[in-house]
Every structure is written in C-alpha cells, then in structure tokens.
Image (tube, helix red, strand yellow):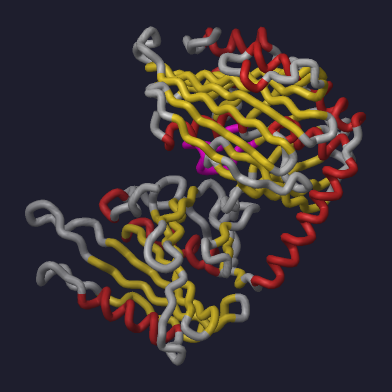
Amino acid sequence: MKKQTRIAVLTALLASASAPLAAAQLSRQPGRSTGTTTAMVTLSDQPVALESGRVRFYPPAGSTWQRFRGLGNGSTQVTAEDQSWFINVQTPASTNLDQTAADVADAISQQLLQSQSGPRLTPTLLSRERNLIVNGLTAERFYVRQPQPGKGNRPGTPIIRGYTVLPLEPGLFATFELVTTEPSFADSRATFETVVATVEVVDPDDDQASLASATDAAKSFLTDLTSEDYLRAINANTNAWHRLAEPASTGRITDDRELSYRRVNARVGNRGELAQSAGGNQLASPQNERGYLVGIDSRYLTPEQIVDSRGTFFMTSDRRREAWVLTLTIRDRANPKSTPLIWTERGVRENDQLRVRVTQSDGSVAAFDPTVDPDITLTQVERFLLGDLLVAAGASGDHAFQHWSSNTTSVTQRRDTITRLPESITVSSTMGADTRAQITRYNPDGSFRSTALPTGAHQQPAVWTPVQPQRLAGIWRDKGLPID
C-alpha cells in the first residue's frame, strides 16, 4: 500500500505535495465579487504558519493550502476554492544585509518584464506601489500582465502576477505572489491584498513561551485525570456510531457525499482482549491486566477503494503501559472480491519506551522505537478520547501534547485549545506542523455534537456527526453504497 493512501485514509478514519498549479490550469471563470480589499473577503479563523515559523497569515475561507519543500524554507501555496487564483508564499534570504524590500521587488519585476516568447507577448507593468505599511512593516507591491499565446490568430488569456515583498530582518524577506487570469484579476486582487494585510511576524521567543505554557498545562491535565474522568469519557463512547460526510449546499441529507462511518466502543476491561484482534496475541500479556480499552471499526470510501479499519487500544489506569493493534484492509471498489492490501500496526509502550512494528501484505516490516516523555505523551486510548476527557475534566485554554501518529509513523505534537461558552464547548485541535484546525463541538452537557475536519483534507469541508446505526445503514443503502 502506498504511504500516501494510508495517510489519507487514517486522517479521515481516526482523526476526531503536488507541483505548483500551472497558469494554464487556472479557471477562466471570474472570481466571486469581494468588493473592497477590506470589506467583503471572508477569511479562515485559523492562520497558516510558514515552515520557517517566522510568518503567519489568514487564508480566505474555503481555500486550500499545501507546502512544497525545496531550497531554503520551501514555499506554501494557497489555492482558491474555485481555482481562479493561487498565492505562493516564501521567505527568501539574501547574503546582502543591506538589500531592501524595494530592491527585491525591483529585481523580481524586472525579471518578469524581460520574459517573453514573441513580439506580441511583451509583459507590461500594471502598477508599482512603494512604501506600503502592512502591520507596521514597510512593504513593496507590483502587478505585471503577461500575455499568453493562443490558437491561430486568437490570443490566449493573459496571466496577471502580483508580488508583495515584506522585510522580516536584515537579509530575510517574505514574498507573497498572486497568480491569476485577467478576467479574475479584480476580485483576486481584492482577496490577495486582504490576505497580505493579515500577515503577522512571529517572535520566536513568544512562540517558545506559548509552547512551554501549553506543555505545562498538558502535563498538569494528564497528572490530574481521575478514574471518574476516564469513566465519563468511556461512557460517552460506548457503542457510539459516527458518520463522516460532505454536507450538501441544499441542506438535504440525500444530497450529502458519504465518506466514512465508524463505531467506537470504549470500555473498562483486560489486556487479554487484544487477543481478539488479528495479530493481537503477542500484545495480550499479561491477560488479566486491568485498564481501559477503545475499539474503533471504520469504513472509508474513495472513488476507487473500500478501506476498512479495525483498531483495539489498551492502557493501564496508571498510564504506565499501553498496547494496540490497528489493521487497514484495502479493496478495489470495482472488484471487492480481489485480493486486498493489508497493513497492520502493532504498538507497545512501557513508561518512556515505545515499540511499534508495521507489517504490509508483501511481508515487509518497518520498526520504530522512539523514546517518549510519558508526562505529556497521550496513550492511544487517550488520543481517541481526548476531547471527551478535556470536557469531562473541566479543562480550558491551550494544551500541547505529544502522541504516536500512525499517519506519519512518528511521535507528533498536537495543540488543543478548549473554549467554554454557555451554549457550547469547543475543542480546536492542530496536529504536527499543520496549522489547519480540526474543530470539535460539544453541547453544554458535554455530549458530542460534531467534528469538522480541516478544509483541504477533502474536496469540501467534511464533518463527523453522531448517528444511530439503523439510520446510517438506511442512508448508505439508499445511496447504493457498500455497508456491512
């Protein structure tokens, strides 16, 4: 099984880069009206942080983003929901510490103006703005029109490229590049300038202080958890069924796109129950060791595949030991009786020593033996019950945990921010270096309401919601989808 397939599937099942877009791929349809650069552009409520950690900004709501690794700090690309534009963001460095943002903007614009592939394809400078003030930084901006070759005597649709250059420190800059087509330029420009206006330069010392505070909060939270907290979270996840779908704009459930369903069965039990899972015998000793268990059975659909997941996770009540087995079975959707691909992960932890083995259908085995900090590292049971544990324990504010991630086969950091309001409790969760948040909402009584996955994880925003198994079966069967 390809690693990318496994990551995509696990993200959808277990969570409660391509090349930059070519100009020819841009939609030729004009973008939606956004009015002025300050009034009509709706932004995401979660920022995107560049890999360098020095800059963050807020992308438009509904857009998607991804990182590309390369020289220096790589780049981050934000793409419009309707594909009418994209924005590339980089933090280039210069050995010339006297170089200014104006120097960088002039050099880029001259390079663009000199590029042409025919006498009728000469680029033109549409505008050049100097000494812009963006959140206290003196920035430079320009726009260039680049004619494109067409077919026969008909010219192609011109491409518009805009740049904003911001100085971060001597020799280091942030560049925002807009790429769009001429018909979409007016609306895309408004969006671009609004996004740039949200730029924040991050003080590394402030970020470190914030992380240290959140880590201390996570440590205190895990230390103070009681058996009553665990039992409340377990009771909330005993034989619980959830449905993942992309909600339709019509508001009708019959028009939703079904993606996945899962059954979560949390309980108090013995380690020996792991033996009931395929490949779990070697993890089930001592069989009479008491603790908490979480079982998750899921089905996820892609256009080509049916992916079934079964996981059983165990931890002792003192948090010192855990073990789990997780199996993915992938079948061809067009030929479900064909030989499936099977991926199995087995993990065991004793205090700070974690041992994970991943076996694939071809017999290959990957071994991982990281050392972890048990004071801030979630067990797999706690990972899947975390939202309910935070709610049950009355937690609030920012917490920084670590946990083993089957997606990345590594120990990964996560940040969870709990906000309590009279009408709801919200847990905003970000995983690893991804700044897109998974938003889980609970009712005031602590019961689960929904989990919205980060925009970009699917073609449209996807939402987990509680569902009765009979209702779930009816929805999938009415749509002709495979359900067991």
Residue drawn at (62%, 14%) of the image? 277
Residue 240 on the magenta segment: no
Quarter of the image with the N terminus is top left
At x 71%, y 70%, the residue is 206
Residue 355 vertical placement versus 346 (above, below):
below
Q: Tally the numbered discs.
A: 0
Choose top left, top right, bottom left or bottom right for residue 298.
top right
Q: How far across and down, in percent of the image, does residue 442 sit?
A: 79, 34
Q: Return the x and y of residue 189 as percentages of the image width and height.
A: 44, 64
Q: Considering only vertical position in the picture, is 80 above or below 144?
A: above
Main SS of the magenta part reads loop
The spot of residue 306 in percent (x, y) is 45, 18
Q: Is residue 423 left or right of residue 244?
A: right
Give the image location of residue 426, x and y in percent. Answer: 77, 42
Q: Which residues are magenta?
A: 452-463
Q: Is residue 312 above or below residue 135?
A: above
